[in-house]
Image (spheres, helix red, strand yellow):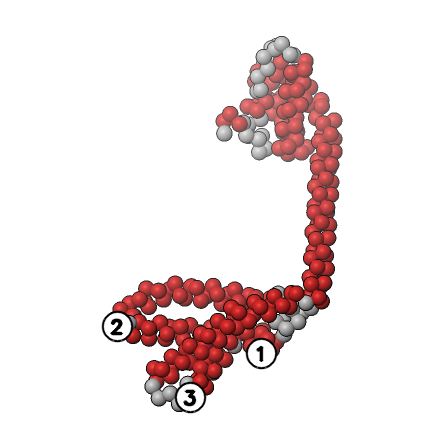
Amino acid sequence: MSRRNIIKLVHLASTAWFMLCIGYILVLALRQAGFHWWIIFSLSGHSALLIFLLISLYLFAIFRGVGRGTKIEVEHPLTSTNCYMVFYVAAPLLGGLAGTLGMIGESRISQFLLGIALGTLGATFLVWIIVDPVTGLVEMLLPASRKHRLERLARVRVLRQKQQEKRKRLLAEILAQEEQDRRRRQEVLQPYAEKLAGLLTTNTIDFKQAEREAVDIGVNAWQIGGLNCMRQLRDMTMDLCKKKYQDSMIIDYVSTWWDGVGSWRNPSLG
């Protein structure tokens, strides 16, 4: 069995023992306050699900931290060692052992168990709430730890800047390529745009015939570059109409004629 798995199992046993001791202290306190057993079990039943969820989330957070090994040995020379990790996760068990040794000679079972539970609670609070944070803070203040942390953060900043610059270059290349494609399509689509502009502004041609020719042009545009190409051709057509026939009322029949061509949909019918 690997070291990580052993630490996880020890921590699971320690947490279960810790919660058992807390439950014993709570039940004993309620009994001493005069509560009947049926009230105690009722309270336990209503809160069992919440306690289970909290323990599950807590274990998940701890296991994730232990499993990933987020501590850096140079910055945490003590708390990253195997001995310290075992000591940390076994704190409730060590507290229970200390409580057992301290209650030797006690004849009353309830007081004997209470001493074990209080020893577990005290040791766990001491190690997890006081000793571990203080130890981690002291480690971070060591000259070697501070130097390594500053260097690591500097490398992270440099790496982040390089990634941002890379994304910017990639975006610029994409935009430049799109602009190049748009200009290339514009040269190809110019004759189609002039033809469509003529279909929109002439009154001598049959409307049905104009629609059929416009649909054929739309199909060609779809085959050339898809929906973006069709949009570009439509915009070019309307610009030509506005430039050549400034005094005329131009109706956008293109959007209607092309409805159903490729993935083109008439916005007024959507």
Q: Identify the mark nearer the N-term, 2 or 1.
A: 1
Amino acid type, callout 1:
Met
Q: Quadrant of residue 80?
A: bottom right
For the N terminus, which image quadrant? bottom right
Judge whether residue 9 can be spotted in this image.
no
The circle drawn on residue 34 is 2
Task: Name the foreground residue: 27 vs 186.
Answer: 27
Judge whether residue 203 can be spotted in this image.
yes
Q: Quadrant of residue 208?
A: top right
Residue found 65% across the figure and 28% down from its top: 232
Q: Residues within 10 Å of mark 2 (few under 14, many from 20)?
A: few
Alpha carbon distance from label 2 to label 1: 48 Å
Amino acid type, callout 2:
Gly
Q: Secondary structure at mark 1?
A: loop
Alpha carbon distance from label 3 to label 2: 28 Å
**Residue 113 placement (x, y as % from top left):** 38, 81
Find disc 1 in the rendering and name its residue: 1
Give left or right: position of 94 versus 192. Answer: left
Alpha carbon distance from label 3 to label 1: 35 Å
Find disc 3 in the rendering and name its residue: 104
